[in-house]
Image (cartoon, rainbow, N blue to C red):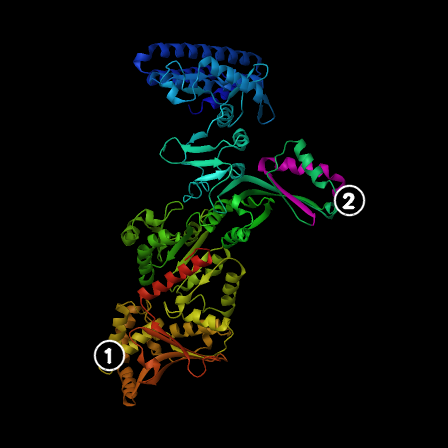
Amino acid sequence: MSGVTDLLIELTELAKKRDASFEAKLESLKLKHLVVLSELLPKGSTHSRNQLGEILDRDFGSLKEILKSIWHVQSCSEQIVEFISGHGEIWSAQILNSYLNSLGRKTEWLDARDILVVESGETSVNVEWETSTQKLTNWLKEKKVSKDESTASVDTDLVDTIVITGFVASTKDGVPTTLKRNGSDYSAAIFGKLLRSDFVSIWTDVDGVLSADPRLVPEAVVLSDLSYQEASELAYFGAKVVHPSTMAPAVKDQIPIWIRNTFNPAAPGTKIHSVSSAKEPVKGFATIDKVALINVEGSGMMGVPGVAQRLFGALRDVKISVIMISQASSEHSICFAIPSLQTKLAKKVVAEAFRSEIETGLIQSVDSIEDCSILAAVGDNMANHPGLSGKFFSALGRSNINIRAIAQGSSERNISVVVAALDSAKALRAVHAGFFLSNHTISIGIIGTGGIGATLLKQLHEETKRLRSEFKLDLRIRGIANSTRMRLSKHSGSLEKEFPLSEWKSDFSINSQPLSLERFVSHVQADDIPHAVIIDCTSNEHLSDLYKEWLTKGIHIITPNKKGNTGSMATYRDLKALARSGSKHYLYETTVGAGLPIINTLRELIQTGDQITSIEGILSGTLSYIFNTFSTTRPFSSVVQEAKQKGYTEPDPRDDLSGQDVARKLVILARESGLSIELSDVEIEALLPEKLLSGSVDEFMKALPSIDAQMLQKALDAEKNGEVLKYVGSIDSKGKARVVLKKFPKNHAFANTQATDNIVAFTTKRYSERPLIVQGPGAGPEVTAAGVFADILRLSSYLGASL
């Protein structure tokens, strides 16, 4: 029954402090057992119930007298605590035995104190195997126990089930004692060995041993089997497995141990045995928190025998537990991890042990780094698998996790690293996903809910389930924001778990809150999710000014917003340098050509050694649509109005018609080509007179017909010469950039575009006679959002997803 052992120990402490509440708590505990006894045993079992009731009365009476003695002397030996704390197992075993008897089972209760003889050590006990085996043999003969169920059905005098108390034992002198913490599991393994069992099953509250802590990695999987060594390693590093000492008796006799779920008995569980049959190189990951790293550094340690012995001997003398050791091959430094609570003592002990070396400068420093965690990867098949360490460290590097110390044994069964405690959960999720034991999770924040942002949400809604099932890619949308309000998910979950993404608009109108960019960004960059990306679907210059700050924080950025790459050249270089300097990614393919691979094509040309001679193109899908639709029979202003209604223009169409949008795209291509150019360097032939550039959007749209006659005359002049009007941008190898309204013959490639087509002609050293042309739709929410989605998938691949 839960909490009984802890309560019994608490009663000894209360009595020692002369706290009179111990009597009431003892009486409450007795009542709890009597109630269970009366409810569990049927009315026909009056004799058993009365008999057990008498035993409980006697035991609780004895404990009360002992606790009163402790009260009087205000002292309690460890031996007395051991005696008192073992009673919970004794009571529960007897109650269970009586219950099974009431069901008609041939059971017998075995008090382990009569059989199991142990010798206590500092933190554990040693079993007297020969004595215990002989005592058990005698007991089995006395009770006529059968190990064969078929025999029990013939001879009703034989016992087929033994209910054994866990946790308790006796010393050589017959004094009751316990097996310390985890003693019940240890009892199972001990009796499994004594009884020469086929296997031992340990019933817990999980379906088996998991590949990681499910509280930190919800996608953790149940492992079908583990070797004894793998289980020991995972248990050492804090995984919820059996304690290593528990397995020792089973390991010696090669007895398999099964970890099963009390609340889901149909689950097969995890088998722990001599050799695991699974082929995965890494079985699981575990962490130890509340760790400090101590570093001892100095030239006086180099080549000096016995330094490690002095160091760890001094720590052993004061009972400091060293969890992990890492030493430089030069012997110039040794660092080791210990529990945080022992940091101050450890530094003091090391300083005293090496006082003379510190005073003479042979040891320069004894430093500590607190608030650390140890992360371990475990698997028998890691040995002789080249590249596993690289995969492990790459997963951490992509998640921007700094490693403070590394350790790996020669068995190659374990790789351990020390990381900052704040990064512990993120690191665990990153490596778990890195080895495809769980989904690659990316936390996504979308800013901008206009045409592109809304369409992107629609596309994500349609595809995220498939990406999760086919590619183990979890695109977790955790925040949506517009210019004034935001909607954040609960905890580290996705908004999709709270409502269908197809209904985000109605949810946003009800559940959004005032926008705080700082809080929005902090929420998206969750501590327990390895990767975070902000997708800026706006044309807001203020947001692009924050890109450097976000990249510095380790947040990836994806954007169709051209403002970030067309600010000052210095800002552009800073953004590129930040993206190159670490594991952050800054993706902006859709800033030119929407979903067309224009920037990637340019990069590949340059990266493969080609030289750009010139770039010319229709770079605005909006203006492409306008001049593909505009004719001598239709007013220019009505075409612009139609383009705006279809979502082809920027929110303010003047951003397109002023030529600024084309100029910005030209600057981006120029800078990607390696040219140093500012937006002010671009010569722009504006389509609009100065008087139309001021005022609101509505005022502009009302005044736009004033230029219809002027535009009509230009169209007539072009048609007269068999030409068409196209608004193009061009740049040459010297950096001369121009945006102009230009006439092209009707057989020219630029004259044959349709709807919102962008077309870009790259003239290079290799493509000198005929330029390389990229053409396709270059405006509209669908294609631009698709381009942003492609950047999300590109980022996922960079972060280790297998697409």
* Residue 260 to residue 797: above or below: above
Give the alpha-carbon distance from disc 2 to disc 1, as whole Å. Answer: 91 Å
Q: Is residue 23 shown left or right of residue 744?
A: right
Residue 646 locus on image (x, y percent): 26, 68
The label nearer to you, 2 versus 1, is 2
Task: Tell me the quarter of the picture where residue 622 sits.
Answer: bottom left
Q: Which mark is residue 677?
A: none
Residue at x 47%, y 70% (from the top left corner):
604
- The residue that mark 1 highlights is 635
Type of amino acid at the residue the image marks with label 1: Pro
Residue 335 located within the stretch drawn in magenta? yes
Sequence-wise first label, 2 or 1:
2
Whether residues under marks 2 and 1 lie with C-beta atoms below 8 angstroms apart, the answer is no
Type of amino acid at the residue the image marks with label 2: Thr
Residue at x 45%, y 71% (from the top left corner):
668
Q: Nearer the viewer, residue 333 or 681?
A: 333
Magenta span: 330-358
- The residue that mark 2 highlights is 360
Residue 400 locus on image (x, y percent): 51, 53
Q: Nearer the viewer, residue 76 or 431?
A: 431
Q: Nearer the viewer, residue 124 or 499?
A: 124
Residue 95 located within the stretch drawn in magenta? no
Q: Residue furthest bottom?
A: 721
Residue 780 locus on image (x, y percent): 31, 67
State the SS at label 2: loop
Q: Residue furthest left?
A: 633
Residue 538 locus on image (x, y percent): 37, 62
State the SS at label 1: loop
